[in-house]
Image (cartoon, rainbow, N blue to C red):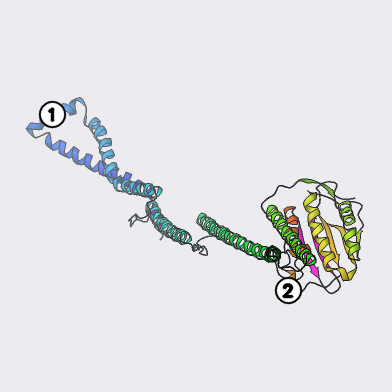
Amino acid sequence: MNLNWVNTVRWKFLAIVLASLGLTAILLYLGYQLGMYLVTVPPFTNYLNFIVVNYGSHMVMSIVGPILFIILYYLLTRTTIRRLENVNNSLQQMAAGNFDQELHTSSHDEIGRIAHTMNDLAQQLRTNLDKISSGLGQVANGQLDHRLHLEDDPSNEWMKVADSINRMAEQLDHSIQEERNAEKTKNDLITGVSHDLRTPLTLILGFLGVIENDRYHDEVELRHYVNIAYEKSLTLKKLVDELFEYTRINNGMPLHVEELDMVAFLQQLAEEFVPSLKKADMACRISTELSSLMIEGDGDLLARGFENLISNAIRYGRKGKYVDIDISRSERYALIKVINYGEPIPQSDLQFIFERFYRGDRSRSSGGTGLGLAIVKSIMEVHGGTISANSDRSQTEFVTRLPLRLSKTTS
């Protein structure tokens, strides 16, 4: 027979009530018998007779009985109440952050089960807090690859705390890696600038030294040396200008945004390159099925970007005789391709050509500063666009994607 129902607080209180009633009845009976005996004892005879005559034995028992019941009920429930007080004190300790205490109980009623549950909860809290504290300590000591793994239900709040700490460590690790990359980028930029500035500057100083020390033979040689120094000075100025523009774009330069029709914009830009194209014995062809293609962007910056691409196409595509500009629309983007038909870019160089100062032969844009294509990439990115390159034996194309204007995009 299952008697688990007996081990409940409800039945224990009922037993206490019954026991209190029973003990009260017994004590009243014993008291009555004692009173009957004391009536015959001279010192108590007058007092007891007075009470019985004036109040009656039933009245006395009705007053004494409830008092005895309350006293007995209080005494019999004291152990249970003390257990509840212990549970309450433990809960207060846990609320204050102390999870080290443990409730000792051998009872299997509701209070005992609550005590066992509280002990399990305190143990789980101690374990999880120790793991979290240890994990945070390792993160604080620089071990950002450490991850918390709590053995628990994924829907539990502790798992959410662990996930938050893991995400914090990942973000911190990512931020530190970005900072290190930024530092490396800065150092690489300084190294590249120093290298590219030193070469023309050394030549300029060398030829100016020859002139300063009168080591030329005649005026023709003098003018030759001056012309070389002047050409190298122009190269130096171009490098400084492109370096300034690159850093200005990448440092959050504000854009002067306006509506631009890329069809008309590129047609006008191609007209400006007619002298350079004739000099290279080349021609520019624009291919599009659109009458207009509207975007929002900084006209000066975009002009600089596409000028670099067209200049690059002229410089490296002379053998192909043509520079083709293809204008189309792809979903929410304006798709512009600048194509030349010169020597292909080696596949090993393609993934690096948009990096600063990359030393591949084909990576350097107009003037050979190594910043031209890096500037183009930065310009497209600050407009929310992208640029990529493809090259094979038949052609080399630079593909740019720029977001279309949100309304009245094309016709």
Residue 154, percent across and down? Answer: 55, 59
Q: Are marks 2 and 1 in contact (CB under 8 Å)?
A: no
Q: Residue at x 37, y 56 (%)?
A: 108
Mark 1 = which residue?
A: 47
Farthest top residue? Answer: 54
Q: Which quadrant of the view contains residue 380?
A: bottom right
Q: Which mark is residue 252?
A: none
The answer for how far apart the CA atoms under marks 2 and 1 are is: 122 Å
- Counting every numbered tag in the picture gives 2
Q: Is residue 316 visible?
A: yes
Going by the image, does 177 lie left or right of 289?
left
Q: Amino acid at mark 1?
A: Tyr
Looking at the image, residue 211 sits to the left or right of residue 172; the answer is right
Q: Is residue 401 magenta?
A: yes
Quarter residue 43 falls in: top left
Q: Is residue 332 at least partly visible in the picture?
A: no
Choose between 80 and 39: the one closer to the eye. 80
Rendered residue at 76%/46% (across/down):
256
| First to last magenta residue range | 385-402
* 367 is within the stretch colored magenta: no
Residue 407 at what x, y percent from top left?
A: 83, 46
Circle 2 residue: 348
> Residue 344: percent from the left, percent from the top?
81, 72
Q: Quadrant of residue 287?
A: bottom right
Using the image, determine if residue 403 lies above or below residue 356.
Answer: above
Tell us which disc is closer to us: 2 or 1. 2
In the image, what residue occupies the spot 24% across and 32% down? 58
**Mark 2 or mark 1, which has the lower sequence index?**
1
Residue 247 or 240: which is nearer the viewer? 240
Q: Give the secondary structure at mark 2.
A: helix
